[in-house]
Amino acid sequence: MKWKDTHNGYISYHAQVAFFGKTGYGKSTTVNSFFGNSILKTSDIAACTRECQSLDFELSPNCYLSLADFPGIGESEYRDHEYLEMYSNFLSTSTVIVYVIRADTRDYSIDESAYKKVFSTHAHSKKAILALNYCDKVEPISRQYLAHPNSEQLKNIDKKIDVVNKIFSPINAIIPYSAETSWNMNTLAKAIVDIVSDSEHIEIV
């Protein structure tokens, strides 16, 4: 997005990558995995992101990138209403939306409802990536630690992608990955960069 200061003509460019999704699905862990450090707070038990956490970077002079980790839905009906409204409000200012769901679940009812409410138009969904996290938990799970899914898991991940594509269609891209093991994180990063690169600059005056 291109920002122009009407007072002095100063122009800067700002790309924001927003992470949406259900609580406990690994949004904060995904952002942390890009850097290999626990920068954002995570929890295995309680919902810990109640406000948007943002990591801001200056890539070059007057060019900025923000990774915004939003609160997760599914905690309560009251908070869902609040958070979904927050998601919708940030659609126009976000360059990319990474909507995180889990690969190791069958019930996508809350995810589907929230996704359709947020992306009410196909135009908005074009900036969205459906990030299929926890692929390391897809059956059959190996007793040994594996950084990459085994051959049988990969087959089931492909089947899961087909299922998810039917539920959330139309969708720009579905990227399977694991934030815990960093498997396929490079593909997710590339998908984000591709949308940022293709996005049109909108002038704000």
Image: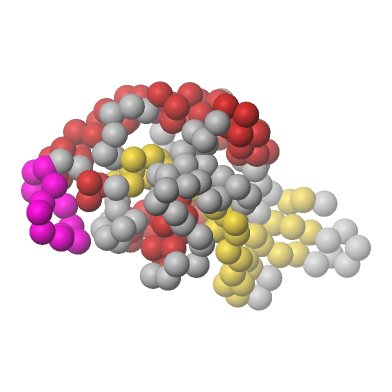
What residue is rendered at 61% in x and 34% in y?
79
Residue 191 visible in the snapshot: no
Q: Position of residue 15 (x, y in %)?
A: 60, 57
Q: Residue furthest bottom?
A: 61
Q: Is residue 148 above or below residue 128?
A: below
Viewport quadrant of the N terminus: bottom right
Q: Is residue 141 magenta?
A: yes
Q: How is the image coloured?
A: secondary structure
Q: Give the total number of marks visible in the rendering.
A: 0
User: Residue, x 10% and y 51% (percent of image)?
Assistant: 142
In the image, residue 137 above or below residue 13? above
Q: Quadrant of residue 174?
A: top left
Name the residue rendered at 57%, 27% in the picture: 77
Percent across and percent down for residue 181 are: 27, 60
Question: At which x and y percent is residue 196?
Answer: 52, 54
Image position of 21 (left or right of 77): left
Extreme right residue here?
7
Q: Position of residue 57 (x, y in %)?
A: 59, 69
Q: Is residue 83 above or below residue 106?
A: below
Name the main secondary structure of what is drawn in magenta.
loop
Give the camera-side residue of 35 and 38.
Answer: 38
Q: Residue at x 47, y 47 (%)?
A: 46
On whether residue 64 falls in the magenta region, the answer is no
| Position of 96 relative to 107 (above/below) | below
Q: Which residues are magenta?
A: 140-152
Whether residue 2 is visible, yes or no, is: yes
**Left or right position of 191 against 40:** left
